[in-house]
């Protein structure tokens, strides 16, 4: 897209804004952003929408997945309202949107996950996607043995090494060498969350990498970047995730993520 004029960038931004906001008057919304925010509003329209959202290499649906994951993790609920609507307009289902915030509980904590879910439920209800009878279905009621078995399967994919399907005897270091935290992580993060079918593993890797990147958790990214590639996320898609992160979490966090990806590709 080199050599483009500002008018071309603005036209692409308005196309994105039309679908993202579900409005037939994106020009009005763009003008309001500039009137209220000055140059910042201009950059939201022309850079975030005209440059970032208009890039090839990733579907609009997946870019929405990345953005709502980042905004939820950062507790940016006002912006999240806009992008939950955009996620539905870009092809995510209400079940998938809610599942993003369910998964978030293990990677950004329950308080942020609950705030994001509250915001998402408000928007989804406005769009006619509220739960039947006003109630969402609870999680499956799993035994500890079932949780561990499912968790071992999931963690084996993430780490690339075999985890025993039956909880091993405690040798003082915990079942995976992290003390009591390790067993809890296997049971909950991998046995409960990763094993759910409401999102594909590939999408879960995208959202986890988005959350970890936005929170600056580079040590965890060193685990989840190769896991994402094993789960079907391509290198180009990770590059697009990083570019999107620059606009929604800041360039420093995107640069740190890019360094983790580069280090892994050098080893691979």
Image (cartoon, rainbow, N blue to C red):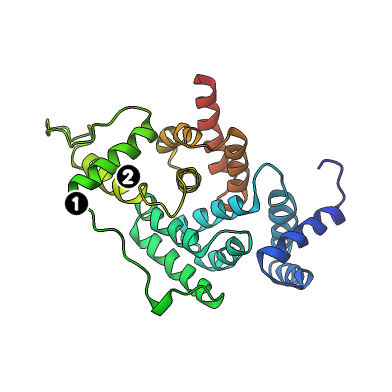
The front one of 86 and 8 is 86
Q: Position of residue 6 (x, y in %)?
A: 85, 53
Task: Work out whether residue 116 or residue 249 is closer to the camera in this orientation and state it.
Answer: 116
**212 is higher (above) or lower (below) than 108:** above
Query: Which of 256 and 209 lies nearest the eye of the viewer?
Result: 209
Q: Residue at x 29, y 46 (%)?
A: 191
Dot 1 crowding, Cα within 10 Å, few <14, some 14–19, many 20+ = few
Q: Would you call the spot at circle 2 few (<14 residues within 10 Å), some (14-19), or many (20 or more)?
A: many
Residue sitting farthest toward the bottom: 133
For the point 86% across and 46% down, which residue is it? 4
The residue positioned 56% from the left and 41% from the top of the image is: 254
| Residue occupying image coordinates x 79% and y 69% | 27
Position of 222 compared to 250: left or right?
A: left
| Corner quadrant of residue 158 | top left
Q: Which element carries disc 1, helix, strand or loop?
A: loop
Q: Is residue 90 above or below residue 258?
A: below
Say which residue label 2 marks: 190
Query: Residue under circle 1?
Result: 143
Q: CA distance from mark 1 to mark 2?
A: 14 Å
Residue 117, given in percent of the width and then of the height, sits at: 43, 66
The answer to the question of whether label 1 and label 2 lie on touching residues, with beta carbons closer than 8 A, is no
């Amino acid at each position: 897209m080199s050599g483009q004029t500002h008018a071309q960038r603005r036209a692409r931004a308005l196309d994105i804004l039309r679908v993202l906001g579900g409005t037939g008057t994106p020009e009005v919304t763009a003008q309001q952003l500039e009137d209220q925010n000055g140059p910042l509003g201009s950059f939201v329209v022309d850079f975030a929408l005209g440059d970032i959202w208009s890039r090839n290499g990733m579907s609009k649906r997946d870019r929405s997945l990345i953005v709502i994951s980042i905004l939820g993790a950062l507790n940016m609920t006002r912006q999240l309202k806009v992008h939950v609507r955009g996620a539905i307009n870009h092809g995510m289902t209400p079940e998938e949107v809610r599942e993003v915030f369910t998964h978030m509980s293990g990677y950004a904590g329950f308080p942020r996950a609950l705030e994001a879910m509250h915001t998402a439920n408000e928007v989804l209800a406005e769009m006619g996607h509220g739960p039947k009878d006003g109630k969402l279905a609870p999680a499956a009621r799993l035994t500890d043995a079932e949780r561990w078995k499912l968790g071992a399967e999931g963690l084996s994919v993430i780490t690339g090494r075999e985890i025993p399907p039956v909880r091993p005897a405690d040798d003082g270091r915990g079942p995976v060498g992290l003390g009591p935290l390790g067993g809890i992580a296997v049971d909950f993060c991998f046995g409960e969350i990763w094993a759910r079918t409401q999102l594909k593993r590939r999408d879960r890797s995208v959202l986890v990498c988005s959350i970890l990147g936005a929170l600056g958790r580079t040590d965890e990214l060193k685990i989840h970047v190769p896991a994402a590639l094993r789960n079907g996320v391509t290198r180009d898609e990770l590059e697009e995730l990083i570019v999107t992160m620059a606009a929604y979490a800041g360039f420093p966090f995107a640069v740190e993520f890019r360094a983790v990806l580069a280090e892994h590709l050098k080893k691979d």
